[in-house]
Amino acid sequence: MPSPNHSPERPRIPNFKRFLVTGAVLGFVVGAVISLLGDDVQGYTTTTGALYIGALGAFVGTGLAGVLGIVLDRSGRDRP
């Protein structure tokens, strides 16, 4: 029997805002690093290429972080 001061355990809900921002930042950094380590592209400066590929990485990172957040949210709620 639970003690009177013990409340029932609520499922932990992930902070989606933090997941999405972290995914975007990590995705941008990974994309920019990949761009800087790769071959030069004719017609684009190194900075422009890093920004374009970094932005693409941010979109991908945000999407993956959102999916991870949803999976964690669902798994936390499935427990009785």
Image: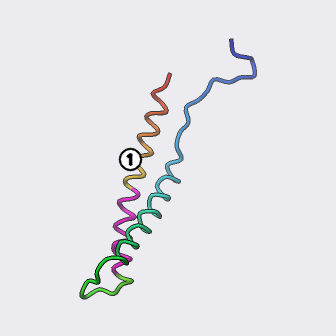
Magenta segment, principal secondary structure? helix
Placement of 1 over or under 46, stated as above or below: above
**Where in the figure is residue 13, as x and y percent of width and height?**
53, 39
Q: Amino acid at mark 1?
A: Val
The quadrant of the picture occupied by the N terminus is top right
Outermost residue, left side: 42
Query: Was residue 61 drawn as part of the magenta stretch in this picture?
Result: yes
In this rendering, would 36 be left or right of 16? left
Q: Which residue is mark 1?
A: 67
Q: Residue at x 29, y 86 (%)?
A: 44
Q: Is residue 65 above or below residue 10?
A: below
Q: Residue 29 in the image: state x and y as whole percent.
A: 44, 68
Q: Position of residue 64 (x, y in %)?
A: 38, 52
Question: Is 66 situated left or right of 1 in this image?
Answer: left
Specify start and end residues of the magenta stretch as a single range.
Answer: 49-62
User: Where in the figure is residue 18, as x and y percent of width and height?
Assistant: 53, 54
The secondary element bearing badge 1 is classed as: helix
Q: Residue furthest top?
A: 1
The crowd level at tag 1 (other Cα within 10 Å; few <14, some 14-19, many 20+) is some
Residue at horizontal 59 percent and vertical 29 percent from the top? 10
The answer to if 19 sits in the magenta stretch is no
Tell me which residue sits at (45%, 27%) in the image.
78
Q: Residue at x 36, y 76 (%)?
A: 37
Q: Nearer the viewer, residue 38 or 75?
A: 38
